[in-house]
Image (cartoon, helix red, strand yellow):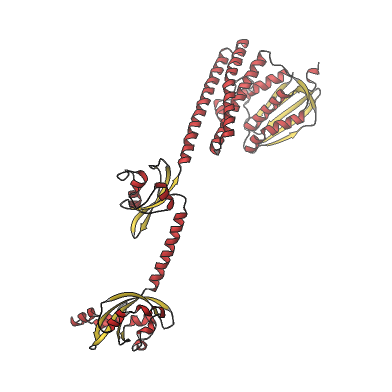
Amino acid sequence: MQLIERLGEAGIGHEKLVENCLVGVYIIQDGVFKYVNPEFSRIFGYSRSELIGMRYTELIAKGDLKKLSKGVRERRLGKGKPTRYEIRGVRKDGTIIDLEVFSVPTVFEGRPAVQGTVLDITERKKLIKELKKERKKFEIICQSIEDPLYLIGKNFDIKYANQKFKEEFNLKRDKKCYKVIYERKSPCKFCPLHRVLEHKKSIKYETTAANSKCYECVSSFVYYNSSPAMLTLMRDITERKEMEEKLKKSKLAFFNMLKDLHEAYEKLKKAYEKVREADKVKGDILANVSHELKTPLTIALGLIDLSLEEEKNENIKEFLERAKKALKRQQVLIDNLINLSRIEKGEFKLKFSFTRLDKLIEECIDELSEKAEKKHVKISVECPPIDVNVDRIELKHVIVNLLDNAIKFNREGGEVTVKVREKGKEVEVCIEDTGIGIEKKYLRKIFEPFFQVDMSARRRYGGAGLGLTIVKRILDLHRGKITVETSPGKGSKFCFSVPILGDLDV
């Protein structure tokens, strides 16, 4: 009001200034209002004529009247100092509102009075209350997070840290982040703070702290007390990193082992090709080298089985299972080489017995069912119950090999059909697929050792080209035969026949 008077003395229209003021302005004398501006009237919901002459205590909430202490009485007498305080007021409709009041003693019409301003801070108080509530929620959430969380300002000072961070890094009072986390004397060379504050974007990175733990961090741009800051969540990935390193070493050991086996196999193949015409020498080399391969292979499989029993980590167990399957394929290859050597040296003897052929075929299909399901290949069988006198183990080897090829070289979602019929004194088994087929120019060579149509087939489908060779040799020993019909791009049909009475059919 003194300012208003000074404005008036300067010739400025202070009455208009007060009338249009955005805060409530009042003058109280003898406990009643002598003047109020339009904003004061709006705040309390009364007309100006209703307010003039009204006791000011009628606008104060009952519980807050005690706040008007001795200082108020002094200001009414024109004494005391200017005072700013908060109090609750009552609108005409009974609504309680929060007010910020500034009052100062003055003289009005020659007598002591109080002049001042009133600001409705109800919404501001509500907002502050909501902010406090949200801050409390934020605090609860941050403290419940099981990972370290901290917030730093542009000067690297830790402004906030949850309990997990304090425990992890033994934080007792606010310090520089590089001292607490890394035990450094100066900021880190590649500190993410500058990037986050500059680009105002979140970044993800990995870091190793002074406690030797590895963390995956996400740092985000935030405002803290109206100033730019960085909020960082740290996740301990030490165990994961150790597991990855362990898996990496296991892979390296496995690939080295496969490399050794591959080199041994290549040596075996070259040795075989060099003495191909010398049957006896060829057989000796195959047998000796294959046995040399089989020993470390058996040891490796044993170690993998032992590791599978003891290992708890699922990723490593999955890796060991793949390794076991790869070594099993090598074992089949070596067994084929040994059997081929024994057959060609005349040391392979069949053990005949009567066997239900339909049951044997069912066993073979069960053995390959998982492989067929993975490729969505449907297998159908037409086989009457029939007994045949054969070497059960070796005939199963024949059927499994032909079925395996029918699945392997089939298309996704293809079909395999197995049909069995009696032909006089023989039984014929035909296995037909809807796969890639074979060009006719290769039909004479498919039963030769190590033959494959081209090297891309080996890379794509695996195998060494011994399967059909063994099939042909076993059927020869049964005094049987095998034929093939094929159409490139449409599929192949392998049919073999053996005497029903086997070695009894003289």
Question: Going by the image, does 164 lie left or right of 100?
Answer: right
Q: Position of residue 1 (x, y in %)?
A: 25, 80
Q: Which residue corresponds to the image point at 48% horizontal and 40% vertical from the top-left?
A: 240
The residue closer to the viewer here, 12 or 83, is 83
Q: Residue furthest left?
A: 10
Q: Which residue corresponds to the image point at 81% horizontal and 23% vertical from the top-left?
A: 424
Tell me the quadrant of the picture where the C terminus can be found.
Answer: top right
Evaluate whether residue 445 shows in this view: no
The residue closer to the viewer here, 413 or 490, is 413
Query: How many callouts does the rendering have?
Result: 0
In the image, residue 452 sits, relative to residue 489, either above or below, namely: above
Q: Quadrant of residue 82?
A: bottom left
The residue closer to the viewer here, 180 or 492, is 180
In the image, residue 55 sits, relative to residue 272, either above or below, namely: below
Q: Quadrant of residue 118?
A: bottom left
Q: Position of residue 331 (x, y in %)?
A: 61, 24
Question: Going by the image, does 17 lie left or right of 480?
Answer: left
In the image, residue 270 sits, relative to residue 225, either above or below, namely: above
The residue closer to the viewer here, 194 or 79, is 79
